[in-house]
Structures are given as structure tokens and as C-alpha cells.
Image (spheres, rainbow, N blue to C red):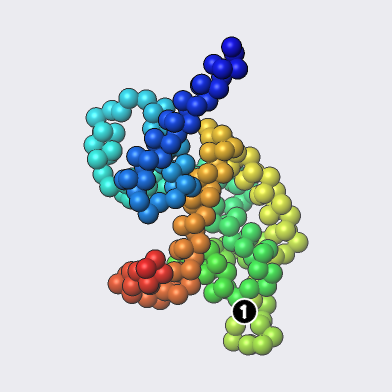
Amino acid sequence: MNKKVNDLAMENKTVQLVNLWHDFEKEHPDENVDDFCRYHLAALEIKKEKPATESEKDFALLPIETKLARSAGRLSRFHASYARKALVDLDLNHLDDFLYLNALSRLKNPKKSELIYENISEFSSGIEIIRRLIKLGLAKEFPDTLDRRSKRLRLTPKGQKVLIQCFTKMQELNFMVYRLLSTQDKELIYSMVRRLDKLHTDVYEKTKNKSLTEIKEVFNHILS
């Protein structure tokens, strides 16, 4: 008897799933199963949210791209704010100081321009960060053997020590920032954000000194 009840329950769930897929496919004919799963996971998250305030209701009416941009921007600023507090006893002023040290370690002996480009910074801001790291004794510049007009950078022993300390602090910070989410949530969000990261990295490499109009053309070409 119990087996029949369980089989019937499973059959009902299967029918429900097929009906959900049927409705989704009608509304989104170009989407696939992965998109279907993401769609319903997002719908479940919305159901978990508390009733919206009036301002939140107004925000909900905005285009989804606007809401994404605002939320991503705020999360980035929260993260940077926490990072300043986490890194202050290492004499680092900003999250960018850590990011530059980390990139410098990965790139080995890059030119200043290569390090700035890697961190997607404005050139003037990047130069200020590099100067600060040199002044703190965390990085050192030296002549490029192939081009005496250029300078390259490397981590100092002190910089390597501070970077290791940064990793410990940033790991704790990252856990705190994303603690609310389950491991599955984090993996799902990362898989989607990674797609955007790859796209914009590709575009950025092609349009570093281009106008917004030219950047739009590159986007259209890549996504067409």
C-alpha cells in the first residue's frame, strides 16, 4: 500500500514538473533546461522574501538590468568597506591594494600598465596604488631588460608576507559576506556571474580605448 502511495506521489510530481516545463517552453522558446532550472530557483528565492515596503515595491517596477546593477554595485561597496576594516592593521588602505598585490603575484614581473589593465583600473588611480605599494615596501620597480624606457614590478619579501596575511583575512571576510547563501546558491550564482565575467573580459580586451558606441558594436557582434 505504501509503495502505491509513494508511486502515485512521484507520478504527480513528474506531471507537475512536465507541466511547468511546458508553460516555461511556451513563454521562453529559445531557453534550455539549465535556464528552466535557474528560472524556478529564482522564483523560489522571491517567495522566501519578506513583504516589500513601498520603496521596495517601486524598486521592483524597475527594469531587471537596473535592479541587478544596483544590487551588484551595493554588494561591491559593502565588500570594499569591510575589506578596509579587515586590512587596516596591514597598512593597506583599500581592497584594491590587496587586489594589486594578488595580481602582481600571479603576473610575476609585469609592467605597470599590465598590472593596471589586469585590475581594470583607471591609469591614474592604478599609478597611485602602485606608488603606495612601493612606498610601503611591498612592491619594487626595476628596469625592463628588453625596453629600458619601461619599468617592471615585483613583490618584495615583505609584500609576499603581507599577501599571505591578506589571504587569511579575505577568506574570513568572503565567508562573512556570502554566509547567508547555501553552497548550492553560491555555486549557482557563480556559474551565472562567471558567464558575464568572461563576456566582459573579452569585450574589455577589444575595446580598452574605444568609445561607448564602439563598445556596443562589439557587444552586438559577439552576441549576434
Q: Which residue is at 58% across, 57% downward?
A: 99
Q: Which residue is nearer to you in this view: 1 or 73?
A: 1
Q: Is residue 31 left or right of residue 99?
A: left
Name the quarter where the C terminus is drawn: bottom left
Name of the residue lying farthest toward the right: 157
Q: Is residue 46 left or right of residue 202?
A: left
Residue type indicated by callout 1? Lys
Q: Is residue 64 above or below residue 211?
A: above
- Is residue 85 something that shows in the picture? no
> Residue 216 placed where, x, y %?
33, 69
Where on the picture, by quarter, is residue 111?
Answer: bottom right
> Residue 59 placed where, x, y %?
27, 39
Q: Which residue is nearer to you in this view: 207 or 85?
A: 207
Q: Is residue 46 left or right of residue 11?
A: left
Secondary element under disc 1, as helix, strand or loop, is strand
Q: Which residue is nearer to you in this view: 189 or 107?
A: 189
Q: Is residue 8 above or below residue 220?
A: above
Question: How many marks on residues?
Answer: 1
Q: Is residue 89 left or right of residue 220?
A: right
Q: Which residue is mark 1?
A: 151
> Residue 33 placed where, x, y %?
47, 47
Name the quarter where the N terminus is drawn: top right
Q: Which residue is at 55% across, 22% downward?
A: 7
Q: Which residue is at 55% across, 41% downward?
A: 186
Q: Which residue is at 41% across, 40% downward?
A: 21
Q: Is residue 215 above or below residue 147?
A: above
> Residue 42 placed where, x, y %?
42, 38
